Amino acid sequence: MELQASNNLIARGINIVGTHDTASKGSLLVGLQTNSGTGIVENIDISDGDVDTNNGNGGTGLLVSDYHQGNITIRDVHVGPFPDNGLYVSGANGSVHVEGGVFENANVAGVRLKGDGSTIEGAQFIVDEPFEGFGAQRPIRLDNGVGMEVRNCDIDMDAPVTEALRILPNVESAVIADVTMELSDQVRDGIAVTQGAGPVTVDDLEVNGNSRYEVYEY
């Protein structure tokens, strides 16, 4: 489904039944095409996920369009395993606010976020079934933006992956607060900050398990 609007977008109560099984695209694409546009996407269930049919080049669960410019809230979505990303914000010109929801076992990232002021709050992330041969199933990845925030999230990981949360160089500033991580001894780091990123403020982080570092900068 492709849902793009100029100014106002409302998408509610969509349940996609069955496993996505093609090597591209995914279940749902949304976006706003003006800077003043606002949208709400909520109560979406794509928990049946996708199977890997092309060595990691499979579908994305929920894609925010590269043309997105406005302000969109994604609330209480349930995203299952996808071999690309669970929720992927592909462009950095708008803002995206993730509120609540469950993200399970996506490759690359459960939520891959871009955009100034974009946020994740109150979401649950589960990684307990690896995609064979990848090892990149981090729950959260912040790619690009100023004033990004991750707050009040729970992360539960039991798979051979590198880190729970990664912050890339194009993130100019970010806040990570009130986040609880339950990590198995197969998870290397809690938060990994890539060299070149701006200041990252971490407050009230709880990491349980055998991770190498709670916060690691490299």
Image: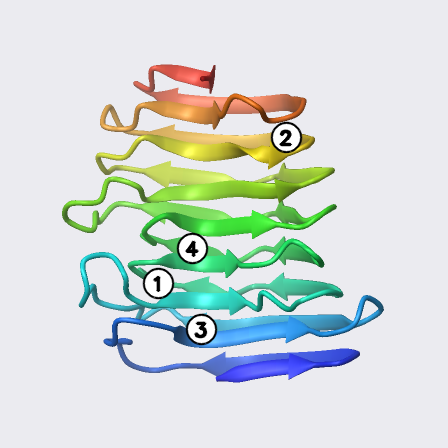
SS at mark 3 in the image: strand
Looking at the picture, how far across and down is residue 112, in whole percent? 50, 50
Instruction: Say how the picture is coloured.
Output: rainbow
Dot 4 or dot 1, earlier in sequence: 1
Q: Amino acid at mark 2?
A: Ala
Dot 4 or dot 2, earlier in sequence: 4
Q: Amino acid at mark 3?
A: Asp
Disc 4: which residue? 103
Mark 4 and mark 1 residues within 8 Å of each other at the beta carbon: no
Relative vertical location of residue 200 with respect to residue 84 in this rendering, above or below:
above
Tell me the crowding category of disc 1: few under 14, some 14 to 19, or many 20 or more residues within 10 angstroms, Cα based: many
Dot 1 or dot 2, earlier in sequence: 1
Seen in the image, is 17 located left or right of residue 172? left
Mark 3 and mark 1 residues within 8 Å of each other at the beta carbon: no
SS at mark 4 in the image: strand
Tell me the crowding category of disc 2: few under 14, some 14 to 19, or many 20 or more residues within 10 angstroms, Cα based: some
Disc 1: which residue? 80
- Can you tell which quarter of the image residue 189 is in? top left
Looking at the picture, how far across and down is residue 68, in whole percent? 66, 67
Q: Amino acid at mark 4?
A: Phe
SS at mark 2 in the image: strand
**Between 155 and 148, the one nearer to me in the picture:** 148
Disc 2: which residue? 177
Q: CA distance from mark 4 to mark 2?
A: 19 Å
Mark 3 and mark 4 residues within 8 Å of each other at the beta carbon: no
Dot 2 or dot 3, earlier in sequence: 3
Dot 3 or dot 1, earlier in sequence: 3
